[in-house]
Image (cartoon, rainbow, N blue to C red):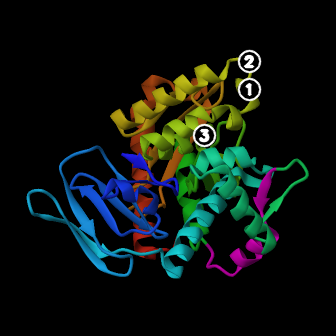
């Protein structure tokens, strides 16, 4: 493959027309290759193979056929329409805003935004500039980015995300009363987890707790690891690789590498057993258990978890705890099912 004068890879025919690739007039393309039509370019990806010639101007409809005569593409060559371009920019802006939201009030650096979203740094910077102009993003004195006030006001007009808070709280409290330990209910919130409910049991000694309404990194809580286990492996590895930015200070003496190994072990346990149960996965000295609430709504993974000191969750108690958690998760599932789609 040769690189054309516009920086995109294309094969042109005849070869002498290589400098004219910016104006698609004639291309050679193989059946195994993918064609991307954008901004008057035809971007051809794939290795060399038997080719057939594609001819047609950017305002004509064209067909591409492989050597076997089967049609592999039919469409109109041309530039990206204004509508398509707006959709493309909006989708990237949404990804950036979600990454900023996941970082919470402390904000996120431009470099980290580019790494987390997979969007080039110049593009992230340009889109953030536009978002800042309309008040959807803001830059702190330390150069980190957070959501803008105007976007927060816009969010106030959205329907409340939780319609059945009191019912969910009662269900969670019943489990806490049964087990005697602290119980949490959390949902996926972009790359983090948002805590919907918390209930304390009768046991007087409690480890560090999470408040209702808190947003925590997925790797920082048992509920978060349960949800993390359901994401694509590339997403899991990205979050684990970035653990040094999100882990609690208590891990500083133990080391990020050992923490990463523990998180991977926890993910494997959840995939194999369908639940998480063990010590020190999220915080030294803390034991916990977590399961997912059966729920089919897209991007609405919900986890139920229990946390306590080591002596409260020994191996001998695992079957009792997990059985009680599954019974509670079915109650939550039934509540969400009767509430209807989009109403919690």
User: Mark 2 — residue?
Assistant: 253
Q: Which residues are magenta?
A: 144-160
Q: Report the residue that reaches farthest toward the front.
A: 16
Left or right of 23, for residue 110: right
Residue 34 seen in this snapshot:
yes
Sooner in the amino-acid sequence: mark 1 or mark 3: 3
Identify the image quadrant of the N terminus: top left
- The 10 Å Cα crowd at callout 2, few under 14, some 14 to 19, many 20 or more, is few
138, 178: nearer the viewer: 138
Please state if 3 lies on the left or on the right of 274 as rendered. Answer: right
- Residue at x 8%, y 57% (from the top left corner): 68
Picture coordinates of residue 161 (x, y %)? 60, 71
| Marks 2 and 1 close (CB-CB < 8 Å) | yes
Mark 1 to mark 3 CA distance (whole Å):
14 Å
Front residue of 133/74: it is 74
Q: For residue 204, say whether it is visible.
A: no
Label 3 environment density (alpha carbons within 10 Å; few <14, some 14–19, many ≥20)? many
Q: Residue at x 60, y 65 (%)?
A: 94
Q: Check residue 221 in the rendering and tell me which mark sits there, or answer none.
A: 3
Q: Check the image and report above or below for 96 versus 268.
A: below
Residue furthest to the left: 68
């Amino acid at each position: 493959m040769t690189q054309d004068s516009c920086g995109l890879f294309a094969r042109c025919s005849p070869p002498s027309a290589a400098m004219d690739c910016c104006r698609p007039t004639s291309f050679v393309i193989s059946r195994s290759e993918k064609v991307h039509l954008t901004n008057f370019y035809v971007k051809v990806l794939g290795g060399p193979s038997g080719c057939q010639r594609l001819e047609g101007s950017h305002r004509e409809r064209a067909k591409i056929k492989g050597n076997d005569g089967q049609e592999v593409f039919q469409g109109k060559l041309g530039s990206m329409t204004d509508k398509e371009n707006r959709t493309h920019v909006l989708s990237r802006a949404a990804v950036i805003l979600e990454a900023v939201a996941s970082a919470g009030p402390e904000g996120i650096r431009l470099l980290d935004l580019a790494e987390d979203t997979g969007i080039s740094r110049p593009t992230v910077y340009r889109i953030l500039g536009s978002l800042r102009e309309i008040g959807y993003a803001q830059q702190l004195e330390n150069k980190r980015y957070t959501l803008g006030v105007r976007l927060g006001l816009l969010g106030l007009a959205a329907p409340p995300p939780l319609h059945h808070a009191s019912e969910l709280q009662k269900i969670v409290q019943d489990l806490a009363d049964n087990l005697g330990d602290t119980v949490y209910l959390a949902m996926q919130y972009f790359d983090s987890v948002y805590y919907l409910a918390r209930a304390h049991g009768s046991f007087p000694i409690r480890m560090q707790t999470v408040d209702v309404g808190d947003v925590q990194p997925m790797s920082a809580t048992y509920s978060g690891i349960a949800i993390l286990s359901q994401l694509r492996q590339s997403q899991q590895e990205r979050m684990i690789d970035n653990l040094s930015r999100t882990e609690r200070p208590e891990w500083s003496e133990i080391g990020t590498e050992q923490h990463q190994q523990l998180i991977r072990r926890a993910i494997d346990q959840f995939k194999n057993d369908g639940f998480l149960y063990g010590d020190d996965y999220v915080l030294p000295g803390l034991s916990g258990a977590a399961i997912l609430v059966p729920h089919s709504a897209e991007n609405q993974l919900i986890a139920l978890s229990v946390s306590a000191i080591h002596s409260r969750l020994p191996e001998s108690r695992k079957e009792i705890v997990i059985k009680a958690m599954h019974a509670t998760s079915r109650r939550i599932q039934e509540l969400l099912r009767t509430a209807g789609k989009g109403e919690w």
